[in-house]
Amino acid sequence: MAVLNATHDAQHRSFVERANLPDCDFPIQNLPFGVFSRANEPARGGVAIGDMIVDLAALARSGLLSGAALKAAEAASGPTLNPLMALGNAPSSALRARLSELLAQGSSDRQAVAACLVPMTEVAMHLPAHIGDFTDFLTSGYHSTRLNPTGKLAANFMSLPIAYHGRASSVRLDGPVRRPHVQRRDGEVVSFGPTKEMDFELELGAFIGAGNRLGDRIAIADASDAIFGHCLINDWSIRDIQRWENVPLGPFLAKSLSTTISPWVVTEEALRPFRAPAFRRAADEPAPLPYLTLKQDQDEGGLDLALTASLLTPRMREAGLAPHKVTDTNFRHMYWTFAQMVTHHASNGCNLQPGDLLGSGTISGPTPGSRACLAELTVRGKEPLHLPNGETRPWLEDGDEVIFAARASRQGYVSIGFGNCRGTVQAAL
Amino acid sequence: MAVLNATHDAQHRSFVERANLPDCDFPIQNLPFGVFSRANEPARGGVAIGDMIVDLAALARSGLLSGAALKAAEAASGPTLNPLMALGNAPSSALRARLSELLAQGSSDRQAVAACLVPMTEVAMHLPAHIGDFTDFLTSGYHSTRLNPTGKLAANFMSLPIAYHGRASSVRLDGPVRRPHVQRRDGEVVSFGPTKEMDFELELGAFIGAGNRLGDRIAIADASDAIFGHCLINDWSIRDIQRWENVPLGPFLAKSLSTTISPWVVTEEALRPFRAPAFRRAADEPAPLPYLTLKQDQDEGGLDLALTASLLTPRMREAGLAPHKVTDTNFRHMYWTFAQMVTHHASNGCNLQPGDLLGSGTISGPTPGSRACLAELTVRGKEPLHLPNGETRPWLEDGDEVIFAARASRQGYVSIGFGNCRGTVQAAL
């Protein structure tokens, strides 16, 4: 099992009371990183605890830190976490250990730490990093099979983690997502107008830490440590243009309209108690090649993370109804581990840089309820979703809000979450 | 015809004598932008003239500039041209006009200007911009047809400029390019090792100027002005993994190993005398949709730019032989204009940012000699190239240097060039 330490102790509690409630995404065992700002102040790094944020710039000046923990807080004092990510994971781990002490119930430094806390309600969140490159993988065999005309796993899917380069400029946090105009073909008629087939895809993201130099590779043994942490991703997808543009170079405008991510980056270290064996392949499926194979990765490269997607329509909102859960899935369904994705990505010498974002691809599982996009849930629009208030949805409509959440839980450990990833479809221009 | 001005005057000469030689890529009519540094000095923007560079940081301090020209030079005084590109094209046009006076034979400011000149032999060149996103198109119908198993133009190729998101982190200037390890399949055997099918692709790049906000589009009438300027691109391509990984999400590791670009950015304004009608479609091919159609773009959205690719092998180098030209093509063969590429790219609201790079795709023409990559030239390795010294090449070998050049010429105008784009294949690690 991945190395655990005092920061994972289930008995540990914080003096920030909200952090100790069982449904809180940000207990003292989580301590995710993000970037926030208060009105008229510059954006800077912070760590979530309950309903508060530790201002890392203030903490760095407080005299409460030293050594690697101080170095990490100083690197996180600017408007992006790229300098922190570039240090590799040891300094942020030292900061996590120190924060675990400072934020504890009975902390002797409580008053000084409290002076560095900012209520979440008073801040605006920002992208955690400048994303140099965004790469999106396709690593759920269930998703791949359902959308493959053959209904089978492709030979290359079983041999390498399939991926495409995504668009970095349009990655955003929570907010409105404009329905795009697209070119599409209906029968023999090609036209340009607002898409009729707007979809979401529920994914998990990984931010790269120190990265590798151009021409070097990342061994599978080093790949897990090359990841700084994780966020949720809504890979908004436009199915009509995707069908039309996809051959031979893959998705382009079907994906570049916008990508929504959640603001908090949950570290590899916070997720250690929830590691799980990698996906178990069927007996007739090929074993990965040696460069993608490591016993430790097979034993614990998976992640037991429950993820949900919910939908809130304008009529549901007006009626005061709660969002309706349409997807309930788990990251354990993924055919490839993030370590394998990282190693494969750098296997040709491609340089991964601090703050680069990798998406897992749609996290669909084997059951109907674990289908993680509308193209699967509605069989490409042919079997519309039925919502509790009688509405139906083959695809997203204007005003629909898509809400993702994720929780990692395990007997004997405090459950942690990711906060929300939310986006609302805006009418086309 | 695109608006010409005094900077295009064929009679105009510079006091930098090298700039007046007929084979010089950088006469006073060109004035491309780049980023250079001298030993122990910070990188900054410059303009090429003959065998010299105008140091724009020094020029901005010289008192020789005012107004928009000064603003442009100041924006170009840092380590990337992104701030200059973000201004849109009017300030750089004002700077071009002023430089055209200052560098002229008989310039009254010759002495002051000469103090801002740096010999090219004394500098290192750097990437002209921080490239936020790199997008690579597929816009030669000849390239597309030769590599399409059907041997025909695909329906979507004729309706939209096909493209994929490329990898921005591995874009580099001239230099060595390491032969990558890749996963590939030979028959039923899947393996991992140094590629056996390394290729080049000769392309023209376009750097985005001011760009557009997320959710906005760029009308075809504004698209040409959205481009700051052009460079040469070698889109190194690895054919064995490309075949294996390409379906369903397009090229990934086949392209991300590295992309080589030339250091000088030739502006839209410098290229105006060489505009040409857009590609003439066959009678049975569909007209572009209205959002991609503009009479001015049809009349002069093309570019009469001759491009060559040459090969220098280690044995040729030892024997003192000159590089052997393997491709002689022209940008007029391209099915789509850059304005159409820009408009289509932003048609879904995707934000293009200053310094983003678009690649045209392989610039192959109709004749055998105008095939612009080895996959075409050697029919996927089956008909190796024959070099003058008796060597053959189905694909690139270690030590092979690939050299691109381009010249725009037209009766009555001074011909301008792009400098070289060079890369040498290094042995695998």
Image: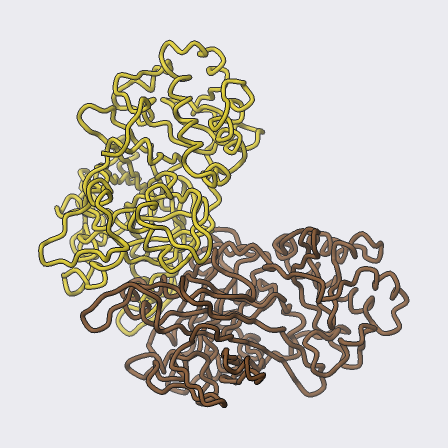
Chain colours: A yellow, B brown
| Quadrant containing the N terminus of chain A in the rendered view | top left
Task: Using the image as rendered, state which of residue B307 and residue A374 is in the foreground.
Answer: B307
Q: Residue furthest front?
A: B318
The part of the image, by quadrant, that contains residue A401 is top left
Task: Using the image as rendered, state which of residue A408 and residue B185 is in the foreground.
Answer: B185
From this viewpoint, is residue A326 visible? Answer: no
Determine whether, in the image, residue B86 is placed left or right of residue A366.
right
Whether residue B424 is situated above or below residue A202 in the rendered picture: below
Please give the name of the residue rendered at 13% of the width and 58% of the height, measured from the top-left corner.
A285
Q: Residue furthest right?
A: B108
Residue A425 is situated, as x and y percent measured from the top left of the image, at 36, 46
Please give the name of the residue rendered at 77% of the width and 79% of the height, measured from the top-left corner.
B20
Residue A231 is situated, as x and y percent measured from the top left of the image, at 35, 39
Whether residue A144 is situated above or below residue B265 in the rendered picture: above
Please give the name of the residue rendered at 25% of the width and 65% of the height, measured from the top-left corner.
B191
Residue B205 is situated, as x and y percent measured from the top left of the image, at 53, 68
Whether residue A309 is situated above or below residue B263 in the rendered picture: above
Residue B283 is situated, as x and y percent measured from the top left of the image, at 40, 87
The part of the image, by quadrant, that contains residue A159 is bottom left
The part of the image, by quadrant, that contains residue A93 is top left
Please give the name of the residue rendered at 24% of the width and 55% of the height, measured from the top-left corner.
A290
Task: Using the image as rendered, state which of residue A5 and residue A412 is in the foreground.
Answer: A5
From this viewpoint, is residue A108 visible? Answer: yes
